[in-house]
C-alpha cells in the first residue's frame, strides 16, 4: 500500500509519481484496483508492516509476475486513481 501513498516521500516507500498515487489507500481499495486491472491475487495480509514505516500496519498483496513490476504498479495505479476520482465527485 505504501507504494501508492501520496503522502509519503519516495524515501519512505512510494514507488510512483504523486500524480499516479492517492492519499492513504486502504488494502481493500488496493485489492479491488488490482482485480479491476485484471490481476489474480494469490495472497494478501493486512497485519504486516512496511520496513521503512514499522509503526504503521500497511498490508500487502501478492500477484503473479506477468510483466515488470513498474508496469504492474502503473496498471494498478491507473485503476486506483480513477476509482478515487469517481468517489470524490
Image (tube, rainbow, N blue to C red):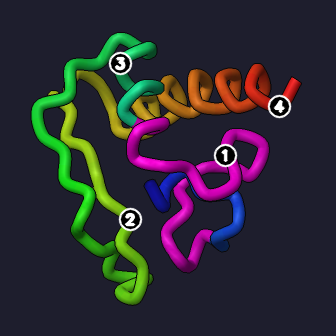
Q: Which region is colored magenta?
A: 10-30
**Which mark is in front, 3 or 4?**
4
Dot 1 corresponds to which residue? Answer: 21
Is 27 drawn above or below residue 82 in the view shown? below
**Which mark is in front, 4 or 1?**
4
Q: Which of marks 1 and 4 precedes in the sequence?
A: 1
Report crowding for label 3: few under 14, some 14 to 19, many 20 or more residues within 10 A (C-alpha): some
- Quadrant location, the N terminus: bottom left
* Farthest-out residue, bottom: 55
Dot 2 corresponds to which residue? Answer: 58
Report crowding for label 4: few under 14, some 14 to 19, many 20 or more residues within 10 A (C-alpha): few
Q: Which of marks 2 and 4 precedes in the sequence?
A: 2
Quadrant in the rendering for residue 67: top left
Q: Residue at x 53, y 56 (%)?
A: 15
Estimate the x, y position of residue 30 in percent, counting from the top left.
44, 38
Most foreground residue, 66 or 19: 19
Marker disc for residue 88: 4
Dot 3 corresponds to which residue? Answer: 35
Estimate the x, y position of residue 20 in percent, counting from the top left.
69, 40
Q: Which of marks 3 and 1 precedes in the sequence?
A: 1
Amino acid at each position: 500500500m505504501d507504494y501508492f501513498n501520496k503522502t509519503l516521500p519516495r524515501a519512505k516507500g512510494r514507488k510512483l509519481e504523486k500524480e499516479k498515487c492517492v492519499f492513504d489507500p486502504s488494502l481493500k481499495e488496493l485489492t479491488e484496483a488490482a482485480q479491476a486491472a485484471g490481476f489474480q491475487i494469490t495472497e494478501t495480509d493486512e497485519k504486516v508492516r512496511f520496513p521503512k514505516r514499522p509503526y504503521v500496519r500497511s498490508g500487502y498483496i501478492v500477484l503473479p509476475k506477468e510483466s515488470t513490476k513498474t508496469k504492474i504498479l502503473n496498471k494498478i495505479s491507473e485503476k486506483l486513481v480513477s476509482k478515487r476520482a469517481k468517489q470524490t465527485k
